[in-house]
Image: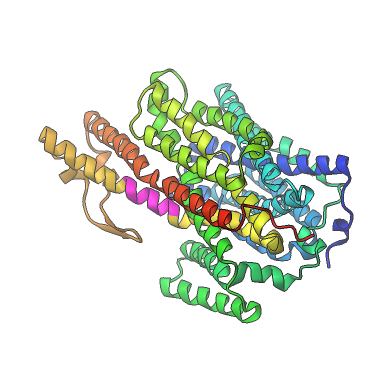
Amino acid sequence: MTATQDIIQPDNHAKSTLFWGCFIVLVASAFGFVFRSFLMPTWAVMFDLSKTQQGEIFGVSFWPFALSIVAFSLIIDRIGYKKSMIFAFICHLISIVLTIFATGYWMLYAGTFFFALGNGAAEAVINPVVASLYPKEKTKWLNILHAGWPMGIAISGLLGIGLLALDINWRIVIGFILIPAVAYGALIINQKFPVNERVKAGVGYLDMLKEVGVLGALIIVVLCVFQLGSLFNWDYKFNIALSIAIVAVFGYFVRSWGKSLFVLLLLAMVPLATMELGTDSWITDLMTPEMKKMGFQGGWVLVFTAVIMTVLRMYSGTVVKFLSPLALLSISALVSAVGLQLLSVSSGIYILLAAVLYAFGKTYLWGTMLGVVSEQFPKGGALALNITSAVGQLGVGIIGAVFLGFIQDSNIDKKLAEYDHIHQTHYHEKLVTGTRSSIFGDYKTIDYSHLSTLDEGSQQVVEQMENKAKKAALSTVSLLPSGLFVFFVLLIIYFNKKGGYKPIDII
């Protein structure tokens, strides 16, 4: 049974209006992400925020999104798409008001929390809605849909650079998020939403859960529990016990291991998201010194690559005419790997060109992965599609971010030791003290409190070693898309043995 507003299929004009409403949701999400990133230094001074508090505000941008998208995916066919979108719209408005009138840490934290909650509820809607609107062209339209994110990054990036250069009050800057938020609200408020193809085909709720199965549930439950565990400082053993208990209950009712290919695609989302989302801010930071040498702000790199991704995604229909989804994924992974390798050895203008190549590579990965999941597992409905996004988001936060930090710390340790050996200095001995542990092994890190007491020349030496370490680490990160390339090629071989890649039609 579906909600009443989902019963009527929209006509072509309504379909177009609904699509662009979904598109602008991602633009609004990007506005919130960019403006908060730009304004954090201002808030840090105005509200006396520590680095830890700033990190907590950034952190709450992610986990509510993932938990929200999973929760709504389980009930969205029951409550209806429109109610979920109205909830997202209200969350976005609450977030904007709380942030504009913020007087300190907690209002900024709450504002970011509600924005992330709204983003998750909205994305739980837009992916299955677009897949249902265009059941014969899912990969094309899901890629076009996700052009909304880089478009929002580009527009808000330009706005942010311009408004901050003009010294416009930060509260007015936040107010600009209302433009896309009100726009998508106005577009969707009177629209009839489509029936999900799973529901239209008469596939039951239990059958949807069986597509995900115990193994799929295990992946998403473990990520969700460990994310909450890190937030509330739960014991490691408690996290494991809670995960097992939830999956056991799920398995008792579902009695299915899930589709093996779907589980593999879920696992692939972790390195894909780490490579795409996890390295973005890192690469921007890496290119900032080079951009300054050319007389540009580091933020222009973000805008430039976002424009490239927007244009490519908007014209993805042309690309998918010539390439199957798996071929597109394999080529994209290979180009991403080459781009990251070039970033690890480039300098000056060439580092910008390498970043452009990397942007080309990652453009189609996320949307095409969602397209493949939707085309191969239509019985999984909104749940299978949205869990794929959630695993990517949670995976990069819990596993990918730790991996990226680990390889940077390890490389800084190595580079400082090499510098000391060549120049007969003692930076490593003075700054790298103590051993810490992570899921990837032991590592050593710089004592930054001690670094701040050193002279400017010493700090510059360490900064140079950090930049070299980051560039060397990019070479390690390139192993992720390299592995994905092999994975996608194997999938191509697998499907070719079955007669070629074909979307599954259940209607």
Q: Which residues are magenta?
A: 400-408
Q: Is residue 350 left or right of residue 75?
A: left
Is residue 401 shown in magenta? yes
Residue 310 lies, with reference to residue 130, above or below; the image says above
| Residue in the foreground of this view, choosing between 258 and 13 | 258
Q: Image quadrant for the C terminus? A: bottom right
Location of residue 364 in the rendering, given as x and y in whole percent from the top left corner: 58, 41
Please check the rendered image and state whether residue 5 is part of the magenta-colored stretch, yes or no.
no
Q: Residue at x 57, y 73 (%)?
A: 257
Does the rendering let one see residue 8?
yes
User: With 459 as the anchor, is 243 left or right in this view?
Assistant: right
Quadrant position of residue 83: bottom right
Image quadrant in which the N terminus is located: bottom right
> Can you name the residue that lies furthest to the bottom here?
252
Q: Residue at x 24, y 32 (%)?
A: 461
Most foreground residue, 340 or 297:
340
Q: In the rendered image, is residue 47 in sight? A: no
405 to 100, vertically: above or below: below
Q: In the picture shown, does residue 10 fall above or below 208?
A: above
> Residue 444 location, x and y as percent?
25, 52
Q: Is residue 505 above or below residue 476?
A: below
Q: Is residue 79 left or right of residue 69?
A: right
Measured as percent of width and height from the top left, residue 97 is found at: 69, 44
Q: Main secondary structure of the magenta part?
A: helix
Q: Quadrant of residue 79?
A: bottom right
